[in-house]
Image: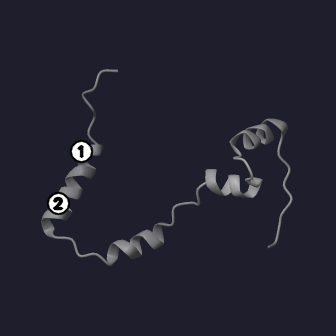
Amino acid sequence: MATKTISIDIEAYERLRGARKDHESFSQTIKRVVKPPFDFKAFRKKVEEFSLSDTTVEAIERQIEDRHKPSNRNY
């Protein structure tokens, strides 16, 4: 396996060391904590494999619209 040397400051190192589990390498810790970026193209391909009813599509669209409406919550 190829490796790459990186430089991080002491605070970042201490955080990484603190997140590390027993017998876990730093590479394993980074892979566990830092998730890969979202692959929209792969997601869209998967979604296109499904057939959704008109009712389902309308329900999804309503949910999306509702998310754009201001909330009545008082914080």
Residue ranking furthest to the top: 75
From the image, tell me which residue sits under label 2. 58
Q: Residue at x 83, y 40 (%)?
A: 9
Q: Is residue 15 above or below residue 7?
A: above
* 17 displayed left or right of 65: right
Q: Residue at x 23, y 76 (%)?
A: 51
Q: Is residue 26 above or below residue 48?
A: above
Q: Which mark is residue 48?
A: none
Q: Which one is nearer the viewer's eye here, 57 or 4?
A: 4
Q: Amino acid at mark 1?
A: Asp
> Residue 53: where, in percent of width, then height?
16, 70
> Residue 44: where, in percent of width, then height?
40, 71
Residue count near mark 2 (Cα–Cα under 10 Å), binned few <14, some 14–19, many ≥20:
few
On-image quarter of the C terminus: top left
Q: CA distance from mark 2 to mark 1?
A: 12 Å
From the image, tell me which residue sits under label 1. 66
> Residue 47: where, in percent of width, then height?
34, 72
> Residue 3: where, in percent of width, then height?
83, 66
Q: Residue at x 22, y 57 (%)?
A: 61
Q: Amino acid at mark 2?
A: Glu
Residue count near mark 1 (Cα–Cα under 10 Å), binned few <14, some 14–19, many ≥20:
few
On-image quarter of the N terminus: bottom right
Residue ranking furthest to the bottom: 49
Q: Residue at x 76, y 53 (%)?
A: 26
